[in-house]
Image (spheres, grey):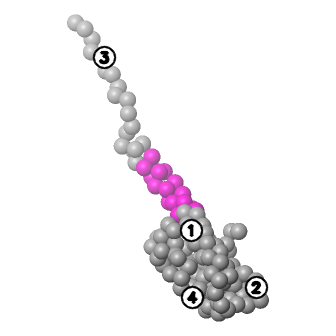
Amino acid sequence: MASLTHNAIQGFTLIESMVSMALLGILMGIALPSFEQQWQHTRRQDAQNALMQLHLRQTQWRGMHAQYASSLAELAWPNAASNSGHYTLSVQQVTAHSFELHATAIGLQSRDTPCLTISLLRMADGSVRRTSNRADLTDLGRCWTW
């Protein structure tokens, strides 16, 4: 009579599977906040690029008019959103010598509280200042990387 051999089935036990899932959960808990911060930092480029483009358009506009443009429409900006749609843009405090451009985070980007508002200010003395969270002279959130 042929002897029956017992072939062990290879695989994970329930305990091994649960330990693996717990380790995966711990690693995700560590990695996800850092990953989200990196995305927020990357999306700030959307605001910076839009503000720099608007600054250039303001300079071109001023070359042909008595003062800077007071609206996005005058600058031929299609709507109030940045190119990728992570910020709402506005033009404020316009005079013949100065203006303020603001980009306010919307959607998921509004979780980026240190850089909720990123601004570019053209001062009356001709200097250009990059600020954050509506601070007059400083970039408190270190939002501008260039």
Q: Which element is circle 1 on?
A: helix
For mark 1, does the 10 Å Cα neighbourhood hold few (<14), some (14 to 19), or many (20 or more) residues?
A: some
Q: Quadrant of residue 5?
A: top left
For mark 4, does the 10 Å Cα neighbourhood hold few (<14), some (14 to 19), or many (20 or more) residues?
A: some
How many angstroms separate mark 3 from mark 4 (CA)?
87 Å
Which residue in the protein does label 4 denote?
A: 70
Front one among 128 and 68? 68
Q: Which element is circle 2 on?
A: loop
Q: Is residue 133 visible?
A: no
Q: Which element is circle 4 on?
A: loop
Q: Quadrant of residue 141?
A: bottom right
Q: Residue at x 62, y 91 (%)?
A: 94
Camera-near label (1 vs 3) is 1
Q: Residue at x 27, y 11 (%)?
A: 3
User: Which circle's residue, 2 or 4, is located before the other in the chain?
Assistant: 4
Q: Residue 68: image x %, image y %?
A: 63, 87
Query: Which disc number belongs to residue 126?
Result: 2
Q: Residue at x 49, y 56 (%)?
A: 28
The answer to whether residue 28 is magenta is: yes
In this rendering, the answer to whether 65 lies above or below 23 is below
Which residue in the protein does label 3 denote?
A: 5
Residue type at mark 2: give it: Gly
How many angstroms separate mark 1 from mark 3 (CA)?
66 Å
Q: Residue 88: image x %, image y %?
A: 50, 78
- The stretch in magenta equals 20-38
Q: Which element is circle 3 on?
A: loop
How many angstroms separate mark 1 from mark 4 (CA)?
22 Å
Q: Residue at x 46, y 55 (%)?
A: 25
How many angstroms separate mark 2 from mark 1 (CA)?
25 Å
Residue type at mark 3: give it: Thr
Which residue in the protein does label 1 denote?
A: 46
User: Which circle's residue, 1 or 4, is located before the other in the chain?
Assistant: 1
